Image (cartoon, rainbow, N blue to C red):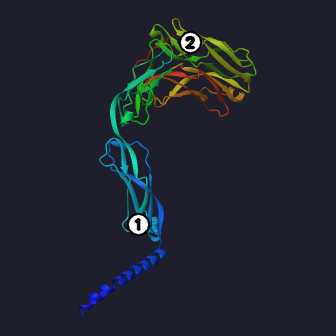
């Protein structure tokens, strides 16, 4: 029995083999017809890994990899549904600055089998890497223009003297200077400002794409009056009264302040804080007045610029008006300070019903200037008129501004010139 079985197998082996192959073909055909193989293109996000911290990619890179796969339809459907089934990347580990051609790498989750890659686009990518560097440069600062005539500028105080320029080597190496500019044209007071910094190449062009640390610089530019100069309020002097049945509605002067000068600074310092115009006669006026008046200046004192001012007086048919003179009161002054007002009185033009104007008491109209929060020094302020009768209002105050000198209690104040 043992000797006959091997001979039987040998004689029928080809028949068994043919039957096995035919069975396998039938099985594959059945499986394929139920879940046929198909091709499908997938777009996969490409990650850049391993980039050194001192390098930056400067070339344009594809952000997607097109991968054509061949697999049964059921496998392709699973890949489509599951996020992260395919991963793609370019490994930049160990690379230095320069141009590199790197293979596109990808991986399909091992759960999805069988699957075959038909095509990959792109297969490689050309990457340009540039070194990131930094350097320190002095900040070039400049001040342009001149302050208003009579004022002077002290050396400015800048918050920083140096700046760090960082970025790509090709851009940082272009930078030869970092600078900023402050204009003081027409300035009459101290300037405190933050200014942007800009990087320039050798040809004077702005270099973009670099990081400046700090990106801006602070500056304090002190502006003060020169010796012998003084900015003073203009007070219009009027005489007479407008015609009966008419009232003065307003009075203004342009400019409201003038710059005066004396070769002897002490003379200017002793002025009362205002200059008067030559008298304007209002006697019998019944219409608006617009005229040019000269200034009544002490000997040795001159005006910088035009020595004349434009005075405008509004006159209208009146219901009732009254021009009064009131001393200027100060309020809100700190108890450790004292104040001197110049001029110490102002003209107030009131308008309202005549009976109420006629019945006004001295205490019904006050002129006050609020000194709350002010420190020692010279201040030009606008006085406020406080009127008790509700139907009477102040049409105009002359001068519109007054000068207030605030000093510590016990400190002597200069004596005004007569």
Q: How crowded is mark 1: few (under 14 residues within 10 Å), some or many (20 or more)?
A: some
- The percent position of residue 73, horizontal first and vertical second, equals 47, 70
Nearer-the-camera pick, 379 or 150:
150
Q: How far apart are marks 2 and 1 (CA)?
A: 93 Å
Q: Which residue lies furthest to the top in this view?
A: 299
Label 2 belongs to which residue?
Answer: 305
| Element assignment for label 2 | loop
Of callouts 2 and 1, which one flags the residue occurring earlier in the amino acid sequence?
A: 1
Q: Which residue lies furthest to the bottom in this view?
A: 1
Nearer-the-camera pick, 34 or 418:
34
Nearer-the-camera pick, 39 or 270:
39
Left/right of residue 9 with respect to residue 69 in the rendered view: left
The answer to whether residue 212 is visible is no
Say which mark, if any, is on residue 266. none
What residue is shown at x 54% (from left), y 24% (from top)? 328
Q: Residues within 10 Å of mark 2 (few under 14, many from 20)?
A: few
What residue is shown at x 34% (from left), y 39% (from top)? 131
Label 1 belongs to which residue?
Answer: 115
- The percent position of residue 206, horizontal first and vertical second, equals 45, 30
Left/right of residue 251 with respect to residue 194 in the rendered view: right
Instruction: Please tell me whether residue 167 is drawn above or below residue 330 in the rendered image.
Output: below
Instruction: Answer whether labels 2 and 1 touch (C-beta < 8 Å).
Output: no
Q: Residue furthest left?
A: 2
Instruction: Please tell me whether residue 10 is drawn above or below residue 239 in the rendered image.
Output: below
């Amino acid at each position: 029995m043992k000797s006959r079985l091997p001979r039987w197998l040998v004689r029928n082996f080809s028949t068994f083999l043919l039957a096995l192959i035919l069975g396998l073909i039938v099985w594959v055909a059945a499986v394929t017809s139920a879940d046929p193989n198909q091709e499908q293109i997938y777009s996969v996000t490409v990650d850049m890994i391993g980039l050194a911290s001192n390098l930056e990619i400067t070339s344009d890179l594809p952000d997607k990899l097109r991968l054509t796969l061949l697999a049964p339809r059921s496998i392709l459907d699973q890949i489509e549904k599951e996020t992260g089934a395919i991963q793609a990347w370019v490994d930049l580990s160990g690379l230095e600055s320069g141009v590199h051609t790197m293979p596109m790498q990808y991986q399909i989750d091992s759960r999805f089998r069988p699957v075959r890659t038909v095509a990959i686009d792109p297969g490689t990518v050309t990457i340009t890497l540039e070194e990131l560097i930094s350097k320190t440069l002095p900040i070039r600062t400049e001040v342009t223009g001149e302050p208003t005539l009579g004022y002077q500028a002290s050396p400015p105080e800048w918050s920083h003297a140096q700046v760090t320029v960082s970025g790509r080597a090709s851009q940082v190496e272009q930078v030869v200077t970092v600078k900023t500019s402050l204009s003081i044209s027409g300035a009459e007071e101290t300037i405190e400002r933050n200014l942007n910094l800009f990087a320039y190449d050798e040809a004077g062009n702005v270099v973009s794409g670099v990081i400046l640390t700090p990106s801006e610089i602070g500056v304090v530019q002190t502006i003060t009056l020169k010796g012998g100069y003084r900015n003073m309020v203009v007070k219009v002097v009027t005489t007479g009264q407008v015609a009966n049945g008419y009232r003065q509605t307003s009075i203004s002067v342009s400019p409201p302040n003038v710059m005066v000068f004396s070769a002897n600074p002490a003379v200017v310092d002793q002025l009362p804080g205002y200059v008067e115009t030559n008298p304007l006669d209002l006697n019998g006026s019944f219409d608006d007045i617009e005229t040019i008046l000269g200034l009544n200046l002490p000997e040795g004192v001159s005006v910088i610029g035009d020595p004349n001012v434009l005075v405008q007086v509004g006159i209208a048919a009146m219901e009732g008006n009254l021009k009064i003179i009131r001393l200027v009161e100060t309020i809100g002054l700190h108890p450790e300070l004292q104040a001197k007002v110049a001029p110490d009185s102002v003209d107030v033009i009131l308008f309202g019903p005549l009976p109420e104007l006629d019945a006004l008491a001295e205490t019904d109209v006050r002129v006050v200037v609020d000194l709350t929060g002010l420190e020692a020094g010279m201040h030009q302020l606008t006085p406020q008129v406080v009127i008790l009768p509700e139907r009477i209002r102040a049409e105009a105050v002359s001068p519109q501004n007054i000068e207030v000198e605030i000093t510590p209690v016990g400190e002597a104040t200069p004596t005004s010139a007569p």
